[in-house]
Image (cartoon, grey):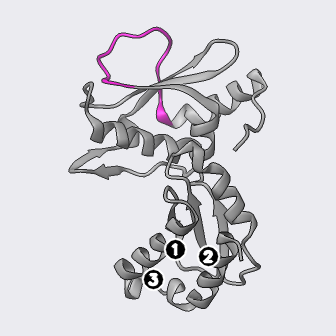
Amino acid sequence: MSKQREFWKWFRKHENQLMDIERDRERIFDQVGEQLKKVDENLTFEFGPKRPRREFIISAGGIRRAFREVSALVAAAPPLEHWQVMAFRPRRWPPNVIEFAGKRVRPEDVQFTLLNNGKTTGIYLFLPGFSEGDKDLKQIGYLILDDALGEYDVETRLGLIKMLPPEAETDGNRYPLSELPVQFDQLVSQLGLGDAEA
């Protein structure tokens, strides 16, 4: 049996517990993480809120080489009446306030400049309090981008990603984060950047 089928066999066996994760969140998260690592050590996941169908999002954790495994695992998912299985962290609008390692960034305080060399896209992301070497704020920047554009687009359609403090001097116009999805989609369409290979 393939590792993907093994995972879904386990998932179906524990479906009721997974649907009620609020009862024992930490233990269930550990179990799901352990099972996903049998497929690929980079895979991560998220559960959506409990509705008639609960989202189960399988992510590559921003690791490009794990994208094929995410796609293969989602493609192997059996029909699940109570679940919506999704590949990659989707866009979330408006983006969340991100708190990580004791630091907090509000989306309304973030600005961006999209870069375009005629062939690829890139971005300067201006984060309050950022300084070179600040790994925590850099991680927050990537989480903000994932919320604004979705994991797949961040990893496959953005070239250069540079985090900068707001006072940094750069070329190009700056815009509030709220304008990023529309501007990004227009630029991708203009450049003819279709689906990249996962």
Q: Report the amino acid beneath label 2.
A: Phe
Q: Secondary structure at mark 3?
A: helix
Ranked by sequence position, the earlier of labels 2 and 3 is 2
Q: Is residue 109 left or right of residue 55?
A: left
Residue that label 3 marks: 21
The Cα–Cα distance between marks 1 and 3, rounded to whole angstroms, is 16 Å
Residue 124 position, x and y percent, is 45, 23
The region drawn magenta spans 163-177
In terms of image quadrants, where is residue 162?
top left
Residue that label 2 marks: 7
Q: Secondary structure at mark 2?
A: helix
Magenta-drawn stretch contains 69: no
Outermost residue to the left: 102
Residue at figure coordinates x 56%, y 91% from the top left: 16
Q: Residues within 10 Å of mark 1 (few under 14, many from 20)?
A: some
In terms of image quadrants, where is residue 135?
top left
The Cα–Cα distance between marks 2 and 3, rounded to whole angstroms, is 18 Å
Residue that label 1 marks: 35
